[in-house]
Amino acid sequence: MIQKFLTVGTVFSVLFVLIAVYFNSSPENELNIRLKHVLQGLIDVESRFKSEMPKVAVGYGACNDLFVEGKDFLQYDDTVIGVYYEDINTIEELKRIFAYFFRHGAAAERYITNSTLFDELVAIASRMKNSRYALGGNAPLMAQRLSQEGCEVLLAATLTPRLRLSLPSTLQVVGGEAERDDVHLILEYKAGDTWGPFTAPRANRFIIHNDDNNPVVSSLEQFQEALQKFQANLLVVSGLQMMDNYPFLPGERLQRLLLIKQQMLSQAPQTRIHFEMASYAETKLLSQLMDLIIPHSDSLGMNEQELANLVSLYQYGNVSIISDSNPRVATVLDQMRQLLSLVRESSRGKAGHRELTRIHVHTLAYQAILTTDSALWPHSDIAAAKASLTAYRHVCATPQVDPDKAKLIMDDSFSVSRAEGSSSRVVMEPQRPVSCWAEDDIQLCVAPVIVCKVSFTYEPFS
């Protein structure tokens, strides 16, 4: 199969070069032509899916995101050096940890223990030019998109009436009413942005918060009651990164995680369960997730940093604080294969565990999906194409993809593994941009991401 991709792709590449030479095309024109072919190819794959939309239950939490330009929000001074912290207490610590992740182009999320400082930062950010508020949190954003796609959706979130009005009326929300919405302050930056002596190698974001509702999963009990009647086809578990470094009472966090585990165990065998990862700093919390949440998930979703962290934790018991923010496809595919084996081995023997059958990794440049059961997870090619297009549509806030506002980052071809002795390569044909192949008992699909050029970053969906 890989050889077929290579042969057909090589022929196409030669023809493309000959045509470009004949018409004296500029490199920019060639890239634009390639982009348009890739875009149409993704749309063609996406349009093949025809099915009844499932019932999806999504937990947990929501927030009000406040976006600012990071380099303008924080004033650089000569005392700033890049330092890693698990949580933040002072403005000096904020600047140092921002510098740490900014210079690596790495995404991160941190809890600010000083509530007074956080409120002051939010007040300053709210007054800044070009700052903006929007509905935030993995759970509501996924729920909103799923509802737009026609799914029947149940969302677990504690919200103020004002923020609830920003959700589609077709979306069912349970979880009570909040007096004040949790606010996440999102410091965005573009590739090439400079802050003091530091230059960002890629676009990304640094998030700080001082949540009250999300860390304790305040919507959990009402969600459980509603789930019994809803009978979901898919349960999505997300937002647990809000538990990171939160000042819980002794044993409180463990008790909340045990209740989430019980909620997962209470689902019917035919209900698929997906766990969406996020940025975690606390190794203890990640270890608890490995013990209580991941073994009861059919599917995992994450970005390239979260993938590297999880593999490191399973292998060595620690987190790789910074990983490659622009990893090669071969690197990610190897880590996905490795993670599948590590999770299955670790989960085996745990009461009520589910066999991991799907891993989805979303990066700035491409989507990669691994499955081991095509009956449970059919149409991975369509899913990869849909994820790529949804990334653009979400950021550019339009259902139509405009090539003039889009770009491709992924290379024309990629190796399928970095293992010694592996020389197989896949050439991405622009008209057939989703590459899928089988390896023993696993199937892999890779699709290039259509990146929206008019915004800083995007939040891909799994």
Image (tube, rainbow, N blue to C red):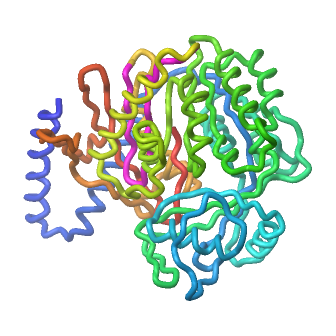
- The one nearer the camera, 315 or 304, is 315
Q: Is residue 433 left or right of residue 305?
A: left
Question: Residue at position x 81%, y 45% from top?
Answer: 213
Visible in this render: residue 84? yes
- The one nearer the camera, 225 or 89, is 89
Q: Where residue 310 appears, x then y in whole percent?
A: 46, 41
Part of the protein shown in magenta: 352-372
Q: Where residue 389 appears, x then y in whole percent?
A: 46, 46
462 shown above or below 414? above
Q: Is residue 439 left or right of residue 383?
A: left
Q: Where residue 285 appears, x then y in whole percent?
A: 62, 41
- Number of numbered callouts drawn: 0
Visible in this render: residue 152? no
Image quadrant holding the N terminus, namely: top left
Question: Residue at position x 75%, y 30% from top?
Answer: 255
Question: Residue at position x 13%, y 33% from top?
Answer: 4
Q: Is residue 85 left or right of residue 318?
A: right
Q: Is residue 361 magenta?
A: yes
- The one nearer the camera, 58 or 385, is 58
Question: Residue at position x 34%, y 58% from top?
Answer: 409
- List the single residue furthest toward the bottom: 78
- The one nearer the camera, 46 or 154, is 154
458 shown above or below 72? above
Q: Is residue 125 magenta?
A: no
285 shown above or below 98? above
- List the single residue furthest toward the top: 269
Residue 435, by quadrant, is top left
Q: Where residue 261 appears, x then y in whole percent?
A: 66, 24
